[in-house]
Amino acid sequence: MKKVVIIGAGGSLAQYVIEALKGLGNLDLTLFARSKNRLSKNIAEGCNIIEGDAMNYNDVKNAVAGREIVYINLAGDLEAMTKNIVKAMQEMDAKRVIAISSIGIYKTPLKPVLVPYRKLSDIIEASGLDYTILRPEWFTNANEVDYSITQKGTPETGTAISRKSIAAFVATIVQNPELHKNENLGISKPD
């Protein structure tokens, strides 16, 4: 049984990822959120819930302890939060991380709004962990699974992608942790 923690479980994309992971079965799923009240009863059902703040190292360490796969879905001070998560994973011997960044973080000049997402990516790539970084196009609520991926260093293509598509891709990686290991991928709906 794979032990997975979702850090930032209260976010809109995380809700879709939680549903996709529940569909896999044979998973011990932990949801880490600032407020458990942000998690609907349906989403929280069958999951371990940890209330905490990703800015607090001890909260993060508690969430990561005993987990094999860490999925990061955050906004805010991503540099500080990512440093906490990476340090906790290294100390707790959790090796596999999947993180959501953003499209456009390698364009010059870098837009100020994208700086935190670039820092998240840089910290994870330098961490020595087995990572997959996803750089999605803007999200939609479309009820579809349709995506294409691009490797770091190649032009990002496509259009806005459904949260359901990203969740399906994350579930594929959780199910097969060797897939896309140490890759930084753009993900979007094909043009």
Image (tube, grey):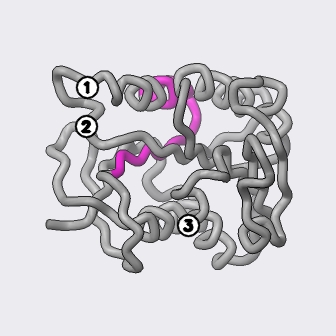
- Kind of element beneath mark 3: helix
Which residue occupies the extreme front position in the image?
Answer: 37
Q: For the point 80% across and 37% down, which residue is it?
A: 52
Q: Dot 3 corresponds to which residue? A: 16
Q: Quadrant of residue 85?
A: top right
List the residue tagged with mark 2: 104
Mark 1 Cα-neighbour bin, 10 Å: few <14, some 14–19, many ≥20: few
Amino acid type at image mark 2: Gly
3 or 111, which is in the foreground? 111
What range of the chain is rendered magenta?
122-136
Q: Earlier in the sequence, mark 3 or mark 2?
A: 3
Which circle's residue, 1 or 3, is located before the other in the chain?
Answer: 3
- The reply to whether dot 1 and dot 2 touch (C-beta < 8 Å) is yes
Q: Position of residue 124 (x, y in %)?
A: 51, 30
Q: Which type of secondary structure does the marked residue at label 2 adopt?
A: loop
Please tell me which of labels 1 and 2 falls first in the chain: 2
> Which dot, 1 or 2, sits closer to the camera?
1
Tell me where residue 170 appears, x and y as whole percent. Answer: 51, 61
- Circle 1 sits in a helix, a strand or a loop, which is it? loop
Residue 142 sits in quarter: bottom left
Crowding around mark 2 (Cα neighbors within 10 Å: few <14, some 14 to 19, many 20+) is: many
Amino acid tagged 1: Lys
Q: CA distance from mark 1 to mark 2?
A: 8 Å
Residue identifier under label 1:
111
